Amino acid sequence: MQDINTYLSNHKQRLLDELFDLLRIPSVSADPAYVADVEAAADYIKNEMEKIGLENISIEETPGYPIVYGEKIINPDLPTVLVYGHYDVQPPDPIELWESDPFEPVIRKTDIHPEGAIFARGASDDKGQMFMHLKAVEYLLQQNQLPVNVKFMIEGEEEVGSPSLAWYVARNHGKLKNDVIIISDTGMVANDVPAITTGLRGLAYVEVEVTGPNRDLHSGLYGGAVANPINILAKMIARLTDDKNRITIPGFYDKVKELSPEERAAIAHTPFDLEQYKKELGIADVYGEEGYTTLERQSIRPSLDVNGIWGGYTGEGAKTIIPSKAYAKISMRLVPDQDPEEIPDLFEQYFKQLAPKAVKVKVTNLHGGYPYVTPTDSPGYKAAAKAMKRAFGKEPLPIYSGGSIPIVPLFEKELGSKSILMGFGLNSDAIHSPNEHYGVFNYFKGIETISYFYDFYKEQLT
């Protein structure tokens, strides 16, 4: 039998080339202009599943983009691992800030990745990380060493909130039946500090519209006499947090689960270089809720951010108007036990109270997801920890992530399964930003680690 590292060394260029072919497909789910490309990415995943030897492969239709399903059932009596990932990506905008074509992957060396990093949209989130799972199973099947059953469910709408996934999962309980779900859409502390994510923040995402006059007005003739929706919106947003950067929405913190001193102490022991953090982001100082560290602010505390704001004239030159409307998109990251169905209602009630009678306010709840905590004493977690220790030579840290993966609590509710969040990205990967990248080291170390997981998982259950 060929060991995994020899296999990776012998097939290194092919494994990179296959990932590059996937990265070249601009599968942007948020933009209808890319419909054909998103579907092409689904076809590519289906073909890869066929090549590596999965069975019962299909492109499953949903109300939105399809889900690609494939499986390898070694023995129905053996445990079953369900792998989840997504083939859609964020829009590449702003294009002008990319140092290379976002859909023409290149490898460049960086300070963090001296062996090189793959620069392309989706390299880390989530094509590179999802593809590792296919390649790990490819190795195990070629060596006739897959010790448990495996199923793959790869979707194409994660970057727009997975609107069709609940619909699909609810209709396919039997097909998706499993003992554990493994997901690589998270990260580690550093390449020499492996980690497993044990907590995710939830999400509530809204769009607000402020309307003033029934048309754009001349700012000279009407300025000072009629409410300007952009001015009003800016003031309303400013009042959503206080001078201690605490969110002012009444009832917002009522269900927030406070961590114990011991849990906060564990977070404080996570390796973290504040000066390097500021340097990487190009900021002079950090900023956030008073009384909490940077690591706590971005993981165990809720947050509120304006993701976009627009209205009026933004073209070249001057156009002196009072706009009729102003808009903003606002996201709130939630922690246990906040409810993403309740928070938008609290937001709407408060936001409308902030508005003067001179304007009308509309709030649209776009999407959201629940926070999630996974236990560290489960067989899946123990197997992942052993796999990481074997690959990296040290115990992985359990960490909280500030990100949201709404489908994780959905899976537990619908399928009764715990999800193991074993990701290999880094905070510096610039996901959702120009120049997204994923370390070559991380890609291959991920394949290696995942291949170990299956043996350790069977060991935990026998």
Image (spheres, rainbow, N blue to C red):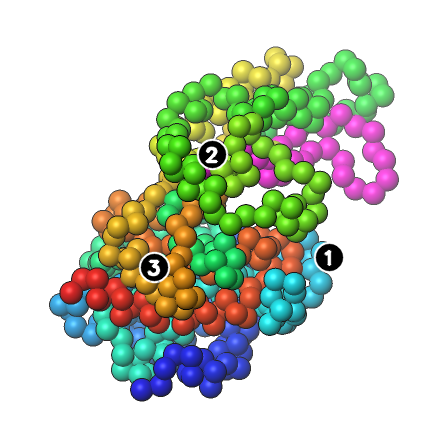
Instruction: Indicate which label's residue lies in the foreground, 2 or 3.
Output: 3
> Can I make out residue 429 in this image?
yes
Disc 1 to disc 2, C-alpha distance: 34 Å
Figure quadrant of residue 172: bottom left
Disc 2 to disc 3, C-alpha distance: 26 Å
Range of residues picked out in magenta = 299-327
Which mark sits nearer the N-terminus, 1 or 2?
Answer: 1
Instruction: Indicate which label's residue lies in the foreground, 1 or 3.
Output: 3
Q: Which mark is residue 385?
A: 3
Q: Is residue 185 above or below residue 300?
A: below
Q: Residue at x 62, y 53 (%)?
A: 433
Judge whether residue 73 is colored magenta.
no
Which residue was labeled with disc 1? Answer: 96
At label 1, the amino acid type is Glu
Q: Secondary structure at mark 1?
A: helix
Q: Position of residue 99 (x, y in %)?
A: 71, 63
At label 2, the amino acid type is Arg
Figure quadrant of residue 352: top right
Q: Residue at x 50, y 66 (%)?
A: 442
Which mark sits nearer the N-terminus, 1 or 3?
Answer: 1
Which mark sits nearer the N-terminus, 2 or 3?
Answer: 2
Judge whether residue 302 is colored magenta.
yes
Label 3 CA crowd tier, 10 Å (few <14, some 14–19, many 20+)? many
Q: Nearer the viewer, residue 381 or 91?
A: 381
